[in-house]
DNA sequence: ATAGTTAGTTTCCTTTAAGAAACAGATAGT
DNA sequence: ACTATCTGTTTCTTAAAGGAAACTAACTAT
């Protein structure tokens, strides 16, 4: 871990920018982290279950985002031989590596909300 | 810390969604995390220094994003009595609380890039 | 036949994000 | 006078994200 007083070299800085861009490209947007979080913490879900769980997402958006997450190997899609057809979405083992990140995002959001509401009272 | 087998209640789930949305609303976009990261790890910078450090950002975008970050108390803006006028931007103590999050984003990005390039070789 | 469920796709539309270029107002150097 | 720097703003344009509603297609229940 770097100390506060440490500085980055130019090549280190370039790598940092690249790494942050990579991550944000995969996860930014209104729904992707929510989708991964739901699958990670609530378990395998079908399309309509996931849709209801997320609340206000549209079918098109969910379909598109799931497809992108599948391409990036964060989610698997399994068609079940049921009638009517059901499809199960599951977070991959690789998606588990996002847990610390999602936890940080969630924790900071909770802290920030407390901070904001406290400042408004004062 | 929750175990893998733990589930969230409905109210917990709503809070998670809210917390994640809050954070992402502040940080999503192409440049905001890069701006905060630069100020956190490279120290106080002037407008043009920051612009050059970020590389491809436009003046309008940098100006807009800095203003939003200022409103959210993550950055301070100080006009210096020099000629020509210079303005210093600095990460606030509150912005320091984002360090663990930014580190996670950066670390995951580095790991992901390694994973992807390894898979391409195989 | 009618209506409902599942899992989407297609089409159309609006909003947001972002970039490019020109300009402004102050100062300073030659 | 001309050019340059610094810190932006303004205007115009394009690209991407996202939402709403209708529709397909298969199956089930009444």
Image (cartoon, coloured by chain):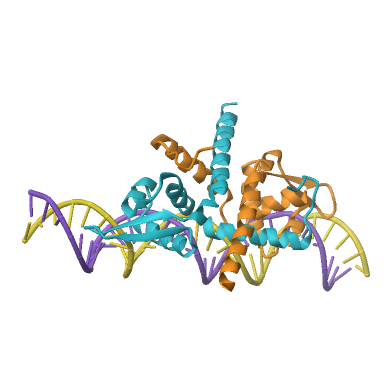
Chain colours: A orange, B cyan, C purple, D yellow
Residue B117 seen:
yes
Q: Is residue A63 above or below residue C26?
A: above
Viewer-closest of B87 and B35:
B87
The quarter holding residue B80 reads bottom left
The quarter holding residue A92 reads top right
* Count of labels in the image: 0
- Name, please, the residue furthest toward the front: A122
Q: In the displayed structure, does residue B66 sit left or right of residue D26?
A: left
Q: Residue at x 45, y 45 (%)?
A: B41
Q: Position of residue D17 (x, y in %)?
A: 55, 58
Q: Position of residue A121 (x, y in %)?
A: 59, 73
Q: Is residue A88 above or below residue B74?
A: above
Q: Residue at x 37, y 46 (%)?
A: B53
Q: Residue at x 46, y 56 (%)?
A: B92
Q: In the displayed structure, does residue A68 sit left or right of residue C20?
A: right
Viewer-closest of A114 and B18:
A114
Q: In the displayed structure, does residue B50 sit left or right of residue C2?
A: left
Viewer-closest of B81 and C10:
B81
Viewer-closest of B44 and C12:
B44
Q: Residue at x 77, y 52 (%)?
A: A42
Q: Position of residue B86 (x, y in %)?
A: 28, 57
């Amino acid at each position: 871990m770097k100390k506060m007083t440490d500085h980055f070299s130019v090549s280190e800085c370039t790598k940092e920018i690249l790494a942050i861009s990579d991550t944000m490209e995969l996860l930014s947007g209104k729904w992707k982290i929510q989708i991964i979080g739901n699958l990670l913490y609530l378990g395998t879900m079908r399309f309509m279950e996931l849709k209801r769980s997320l609340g206000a997402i549209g079918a098109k958006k969910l379909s598109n985002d799931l497809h992108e997450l599948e391409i990036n190997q964060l989610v698997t899609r399994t068609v079940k031989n049921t009638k009517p057809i059901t499809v199960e979405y599951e977070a991959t083992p690789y998606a588990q590596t996002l847990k610390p990140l999602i936890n940080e995002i969630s924790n900071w959001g909770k802290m920030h909300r407390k901070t904001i509401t406290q400042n408004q009272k004062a």
